[in-house]
Image (cartoon, rainbow, N blue to C red):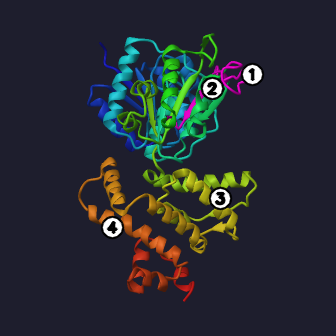
Amino acid sequence: MSQPRVLIVEDDSSIGMVVRAALEAENIGVDVVETASARDAALAAAHYDLMLTDVVLKDRDGIASLENVLSDLPDMPIIIMSAQNTLDTAVRASEINAFEYFPKPFDLNELVVAVKQGIQKRRSENAGEQETLLESTMPMVGRSIAMQEVYRMVARLLRNDLTALILGESGTGKELVAEAIHNLGHRKTGPFVAVNMAAIPAELIEAELFGHEKGAFTGAVGQGIGRFEQAQGGTLFLDEIGDMPHHAQTRLLRALQSGTISRIGGKASIRLDVRIIAATNQDLEALIAEGKFREDLFYRLNVVPVHMPPLRARPEDIGLLTRHFLNLAVREGLPAKQIDDDAISMLTAMPWRGNVRELKNFVYRVVLTAREDRITEVTLSQLGALVGDTAHNATNNCSFDAAVAQFMTEQRQRGVGRERIYARALAAFEKPLLQTVMAQAKGNQLQAAAMLGINRNTLRKKLSDYGLASGRHGDLRR
């Protein structure tokens, strides 16, 4: 069998060089070009088993310019590499049926494995026709590594009807994920029907989901169409599935197993054409152990789990989210506001136990309360009651010991080594402490130093060390 050949389209020469060396070490022939024009010339002149391409190239968009490539070489696997780590990029990669999508920075070993798999696929079978590139408005915001994994999972769910279970704390945006899977997938022309299990009385849930015939129970004066039937041809989103009563779980399991339902009091069997997406902020496996949730139903729902990260696990997204909510506020009739980087840093240091929902509500309150058009650190300090309430609520929900334990867990998950852990932990604690105290002292350094029990000069140095210093703080209320 001839040596496989790969084309790399990458305008960052250092990345091209590293990927080339890794593939050549696996006896894979490699050519590297930097532009879409050079890519087209290379593809016309030689045969390649696979192509890796960046999105942002010197002359054109690496995905948008693939129309002719997809038409002429429909069976060539394409791997997308991109520093534009948004849901839009993941979905665009999925919409051209890319073999794999790697957000930068990526694991080189994982990339090499994907290239080998793609080459094997090319040589063993023909890929199907490529789908047309679509443009969509993205419902989620964030470029953190944690959100990139969510985007990749969403993209993989768009062309199938696999049942998805979205897991995450309250306020992380689970319904947004469900809506994205529906609105960007092949069922987007059908209805999206959302049901919150926690909001429906236990005795009414079965009638709500499955419908009822006239006279089926007291008060059933006519036929009722349930949410399953309302969602025919589309998606049924079962939110807070952990709150579903046990008797309704049994009926839901039967519907998932058979693909049919019958209305309460009815005999006719109704064939379902509905995608099921469930979500919960509870630990379903713990509920199973307590006998409150059916284990067989859990396995039926947990076909493709999607884990929504808490906001504290993606603090780098807080600036993007804040500016996004400022724009949304304008659309909803609130005053237009700008925000500076110091204020973003202050918001980033806050704990946000209510996650994205809490951040959105907080931004709206600031927009409504602040008199000036530009939100600064001083603006937030003057609104200290708002900041203090958020921090206080977080403290009630999480002890200091638990916060330290979580910090250590997150460090391990990010692959951070054990060295200098004291310095990192101190910085993680000290900066938000200083910000919170400064907010509560409304920018008065003398008062803040007194609250902390340290010298004012020491406070000034610490503020400077953490990039929190500004001449304003010492001048606010002497």
Front disc: 3 or 1: 1
Residue 445's x, y, as percent? Answer: 49, 83
Tell which circle, 1 or 4, labels the residue nearer the N-terminal end: 1
Image quarter of the N terminus: top left
User: What's drawn in magenta, residue-wise?
Assistant: 213-241
* Residue type marked 1: Gly
- Disc 4 designates what residue? 426
In the image, residue 449 lies at what x, y percent?
A: 43, 83
Quadrant position of the C terminus in the picture: bottom right
**Disc 4/disc 2 C-alpha distance (Å):** 55 Å
Judge by depth and name the residue closer to the eye, 224 or 215. Answer: 215
Q: Residue at x 43, y 18 (%)?
A: 47
Which secondary structure, mark 2?
A: helix
Label at residue 222: 1
Q: Are marks 4 and 2 in contact (CB under 8 Å)?
A: no
Which of pointers 1 and 4 indicates the residue nearer the eye?
1
